[in-house]
Image (cartoon, rainbow, N blue to C red):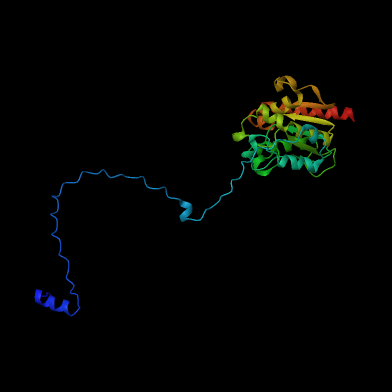
Amino acid sequence: MSWSERQQAMLEAMGLRVWTAPPVPEPEPEPEPTAPEPVLAKVEAPAPVRVASVLPQIVVPVQPAEQPRAPAAAGAVAAMDWTQLREAVAGCRACGLCEGRKHTVFGVGHERAHWMVVGEAPGEQEDLQGEPFVGQAGKLLDSMLRAIGLTRADGPPEKQVFIANTLKCRPPRNRNPEPEELAQCEPYLNRQIALVQPRIILAMGRFAVQSLLRSSEPIGRLRGRVHEYQGVPLIVTYHPAYLLRNLVDKARAWEDLCLAMDVLQRKT
C-alpha cells in the first residue's frame, strides 16, 4: 500500500512511523553466453568385483599329491613273516606298475613246498585273478607238473609246488620287465624263497633266469645243467607261454623236468 506525502505527515504527527520498502535495484544485464571449453571426460576403470562380498567364501582343502611309496628296505623284508610279506606286496607302490594293476600277484602253493617254480611277470589273466600262471600257459604248467606227480594245491609239501613271479605287478600290454622294476621286486622274491626253503628251484623264462642267476646267457645255453641259488639247486627251462608258440621245445622242457627230479632224488 502506498501513502501520499500528506498521509505520511499525519501519521508521523501521531507518532507512527511509516515503513517504506527500499528501492529495488535495477538488475544488472547478464553477460553474453560463451561456448564452454570442451572437457574430456575421465573414464575410470571399473572397480574389480569382489566375489567374496557377494558370495560366501568357499575354502576347498588341497590334498597333497600321493607320493610313491618305496618298498621296505631289503633288510626289513628279510625279517618278514608270510603275513607281513603279503601285506607289503599288496601295498607296494615302489614303481609305476602299481598304477595300472588290478591285483598284485603274490604267489600260490604250499609254504614249505619241496619244489619252487619261479616265472617272469604276470599277464592279463594273472592281473585279473591275482594268481600266477593262469590261462593257457597255466594249464600247460599244471599238465607238466601232473606228469611228474606234482600239483599247485591240495597235497603234502613233497607233492606240492610254490609258484611265484619275479614281478608282482603286470607290465602294461605284457611288455618285458624293466631292470628297475625287477630290482624293486627282488627283495620280495628273495624272502619268498627263504620262507619256502625249497629243495629245488625251477626257473622258467629268460627274466626269471637272469634275475636268479645274474646271467645274460640265453636259456638254450643254461638249460641241461644244474645251477645254484643261495645253495639251492636250480634248473633252467622254458616258460610255458613260450612253449605254446614253440611246440618243438616241449621235449626239451620235459628233459629239464626229468633233470630236476633226478637232482631232487639224489639230494634226498
Along the line of sight, the residue nearer the viewer: 31 or 171: 31
Left or right of residue 268, residue 75 in this image: left
Q: How many marks?
A: 0
User: From this viewpoint, which residue is outermost toward the front?
Assistant: 13
Could you tell me which quadrant the C terminus lies in?
Answer: top right
Q: Residue at 13% across / 79% down in the picture?
A: 10
Q: Could you tell me residue 19's position as x and y percent? A: 18, 72
Q: Residue at 67% across / 31% down in the picture?
A: 181
Along the line of sight, the residue nearer the viewer: 191 or 44: 44
Residue 159 appears in which quarter of the rendering?
A: top right
Q: Could you tell me residue 152's position as x and y percent? A: 77, 40
Q: Residue at 74% across / 31% down in the picture?
A: 186
Along the line of sight, the residue nearer the viewer: 105 or 58: 58
Q: Could you tell me residue 249's position as x and y percent? A: 69, 26
Left or right of residue 62, residue 148 in this image: right
Residue 147 appears in view = yes
Residue 6 appears in which quarter of the rendering?
A: bottom left
> Height in image: 33 above or below 191?
below
Q: Could you tell me residue 208's position as x and y percent? A: 72, 28
> Height in image: 211 above or below 63?
above
Along the line of sight, the residue nearer the viewer: 41 or 207: 41
